[in-house]
Image (cartoon, grey):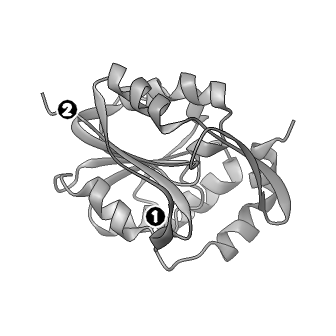
Amino acid sequence: MIDNRAVYERQALRYDRERGRSLFEAPWLRACVADVPPRGRVLDLGCGAGAPIGAWLVARGFAVTGVDFSPAMLRLFRARLPGAEAVEADIEGLSLAVHFDAIIGWGSFFHLSEEAQRRALPRIAAHLAPGGRLLLTVGPGAGEALGTVGGETVYHASLDIAEYRAILARGGVTVERFSPEDRETAGHSLLLARRSAA
């Protein structure tokens, strides 16, 4: 079994050095936070070292909470973004006593197994405030895949979009947009969803 946490612990400094800062994610990030009020709460789920996404959120005046399972990544996050809250936690067991106006899980949620995603997604969605949006990178379809971080193998998985829709709908969250292998974001598959405002 591949231990993604151990890989990110070993590769934290290299990952931070090599992580692109071009912010090709920006159009999707803007869509996710479009209705977040000034000083609104945003959860960066799998925040890593805080760049470029966490830094982009902080620069826009949001109250950012970064969650990551890697202590090494969180040390870098805290050093880079001292005004943001940093929480060491696993996505699957997410349990924070607060709701967020937006939740962004870029490059993180897809590290969970299919079964773990089925358990985690309702918990994540439960942290959305009314009208809040959720942005996740997923796969283009159901299945498992392998990737690399710093030359080490990491695990990825995804459910089918129909299953994501069904899980979220049970929690009052509607998928607004799904873009498999999006060309504007270097082939990432993206899911944007929103909790009803009522």
The amino acid type, in three-letter code, at marker 2 is Ser
Residue 10: image x %, image y %?
82, 56
Q: Taking 166 as reference, is 4 left or right?
A: right
Q: Secondary structure at mark 1?
A: helix
Residue 93: image x %, image y %?
57, 26
Q: Residue at x 30, y 31 (%)?
A: 173
Q: Residue at x 56, y 49 (%)?
A: 140
Q: Secondary structure at mark 2?
A: loop
The amino acid type, in three-letter code, at marker 1 is Ile
Q: Residue at x 36, y 61 (%)?
A: 29
* Circle 2 residue: 196
Name the quadrant of the N terminus: top right
Q: Taking 53 as reference, is 90 left or right?
A: right
Q: How many marks?
A: 2
Residue 180: image x %, image y %?
50, 55
Reply above or below: 183 against 177. below
Residue 187 vs residue 2, the one in the foreground? 187
Residue 116 vs residue 17, the one in the foreground? 116
Q: Residue at x 63, y 72 (%)?
A: 19
Q: Are marks 2 and 1 in contact (CB under 8 Å)?
A: no
Name the quadrant of the C terminus: top left
* Circle 1 residue: 53
Q: Taking 104 as reference, is 76 left or right?
A: right
Is residue 77 among what the camera can see? yes
Q: Quadrant of residue 68?
A: top right
Reply above or below: 18 against 4. below
Residue 196: image x %, image y %?
19, 32
